[in-house]
């Protein structure tokens, strides 16, 4: 099969996956017609949990996903879902007294956890920027800009650079900064910085503001100078306020995700010298991430550099990010091996992660090859964002590669 045929096949298969499997699952099963918005959870056993909390991250990611799908495919059904998400978020998740967005709500839309987690707020910027791209809705752009200024006013570290993690409802820095129970309680994290970068990149696409440009460029340099390990080219995950590394875990999924998000930021900024430098670092990150690549095309979850423990589960999101990361590497280098790795990731997903009976993807495949039915099919963290974005990015990138041919 020629490269052109391989590119066309990959594009067609991921477009079909998006249209026929991922998006319909969320459209058909997650709309909460009784209480508004979307349900908070479907279990790994495919049981709807109508009284589950409604997370800000889930709702922001639904808004981003369906806005992006509408931009790419122009199906009015996707815009309807995006608008439903936008309206529910505006009505329930924004703190009209103190500014910012809440962490979570009860199933019926009442405030549950008012904390201002910067990671979560970044996703609202990402989502509202995308809805503006889809519709030109000025209110959505204004909300994204408002959240940007709040992050800069409260979270940015004027002394040592970067962003602090979490605040109370009235913007006091919290003692417990954790994004989740498995995270270290540290002042600064790679994960939050990565998703601020992602959000600022998308906002800069639609709001050409000099302060935003400066902060996005600064954030990219924070990654190149502080977060990427100069020796291993993996991302360090947790830091104190002075950027002393406080972790020993390698996250292969975050490595491969960052490898294309960093280059995307450099592209949007448009500085040629920064693009060249970023591309060089990104290829080093890709090669580091590939230490987790397995013979079956999958990428394992993580490894502890100190105690040697390896988590060999194949979570859904690193597999999705691997497709995009390796396609990006192929575009940067034109080395066929990277296109093969992207295809290998997709082959693993098709064989193991897609739920061909009920729709969507399973949370993970365990190290022993069995399906993880303990963790959610949809929920606070299991959203349509990683896998839908992999499909959308693949279609866009394959179209670009086809034009180049």
Image (spheres, rainbow, N blue to C red):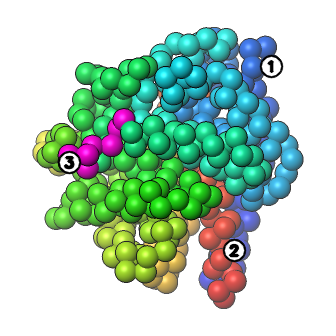
Looking at the image, which is closer to me, 228 or 28?
A: 228
Q: Is residue 290 above or below residue 171?
A: below
Q: Which residue matches tag 1? A: 33
Q: Is residue 348 visible?
A: no
Magenta region's main secondary structure? loop
| Cβ–Cβ under 8 Å for marks 1 and 2 | no
Point out the stretch of residues depicted in magenta: 154-161
Q: Position of residue 118 (x, y in %)?
A: 42, 36
Q: Position of residue 72 (x, y in %)?
A: 75, 59
Q: Which residue matches tag 2? A: 399
Q: Position of residue 376 (x, y in %)?
A: 55, 28
Crowding at label 2, few (<14), some or many (≥20) Cα neighbours within 10 Å?
some
Report the residue that reaches farthest toward the bottom.
405
Of callouts 1 and 3, which one flags the residue occurring earlier in the amino acid sequence? 1
Q: Position of residue 125 (x, y in %)?
A: 55, 43
Q: How much space separates mark 3 and mark 2, taking CA atoms?
A: 42 Å
Q: Residue 110 lies in what quarter of the image?
A: top right
Q: Identify the disc placed on residue 160.
A: 3
- Asked if residue 309 lies left or right of residue 336, the reply is left
Of callouts 1 and 2, which one flags the residue occurring earlier in the amino acid sequence? 1
Crowding at label 1, few (<14), some or many (≥20) Cα neighbours within 10 Å?
few
Looking at the rendered structure, the secondary structure element under dot 2 is helix
Q: How much space separates mark 1 and mark 2, taking CA atoms?
A: 37 Å
Q: Residue at x 70, y 40 (%)?
A: 139
Looking at the rendered structure, the secondary structure element under dot 3 is loop
Q: Is residue 149 above or below residue 202?
A: above
């Amino acid at each position: 099969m020629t490269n052109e045929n391989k590119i066309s096949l990959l594009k067609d298969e991921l477009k079909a996956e998006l249209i026929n499997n991922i998006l319909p699952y969320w459209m058909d099963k997650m709309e909460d017609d009784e209480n508004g918005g979307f349900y908070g959870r479907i279990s790994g056993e495919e049981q709807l949990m109508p009284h589950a909390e409604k997370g800000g991250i889930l709702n922001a990611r639904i808004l981003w996903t369906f806005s992006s799908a509408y931009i790419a495919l122009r199906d009015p059904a996707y815009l309807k879902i995006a608008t439903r998400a936008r309206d529910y978020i505006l009505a329930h998740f924004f703190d009209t007294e103190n500014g910012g967005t809440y962490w979570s709500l009860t199933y019926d839309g009442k405030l549950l956890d008012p904390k201002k987690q910067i990671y979560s707020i970044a996703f609202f910027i990402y989502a509202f920027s995308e809805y503006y791209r889809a519709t030109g809705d000025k209110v959505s752009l204004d909300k994204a800009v408002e959240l940007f200024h709040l992050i800069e006013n409260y979270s940015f570290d004027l002394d040592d650079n970067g962003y602090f993690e979490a605040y109370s409802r009235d913007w006091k820095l919290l003692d417990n900064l954790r994004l989740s129970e498995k995270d270290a309680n540290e002042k600064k994290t790679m994960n939050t910085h990565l998703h601020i970068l992602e959000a600022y990149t998308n906002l800069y696409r639609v709001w050409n503001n000099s302060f935003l440009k400066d902060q996005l460029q600064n954030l990219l340099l924070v990654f190149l100078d502080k977060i990427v390990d100069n020796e291993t080219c993996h991302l360090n995950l947790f830091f104190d306020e002075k950027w002393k590394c406080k972790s020993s875990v390698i996250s292969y999924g975050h490595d491969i995700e960052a490898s294309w998000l960093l280059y995307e930021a450099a592209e949007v900024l448009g500085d040629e010298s920064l693009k060249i430098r970023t591309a060089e670092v990104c290829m080093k990150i890709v090669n580091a991430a590939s230490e987790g690549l397995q013979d079956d095309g999958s990428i394992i979850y993580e490894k502890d550099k100190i105690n040697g423990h390896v988590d060999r589960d194949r979570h859904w999101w690193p597999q999705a990010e691997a497709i995009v990361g390796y396609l990006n590497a192929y575009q940067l280098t034109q080395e066929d091996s990277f296109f093969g790795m992207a295809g290998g990731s997709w082959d693993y997903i098709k064989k193991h992660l897609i739920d061909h009976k009920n729709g969507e993807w399973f949370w993970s495949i365990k190290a022993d090859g069995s399906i993880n039915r303990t963790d959610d099919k949809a929920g606070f963290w299991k959203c349509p964002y990683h896998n839908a974005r992999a499909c959308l990015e693949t279609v866009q990138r394959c179209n670009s590669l086809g034009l180049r041919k």
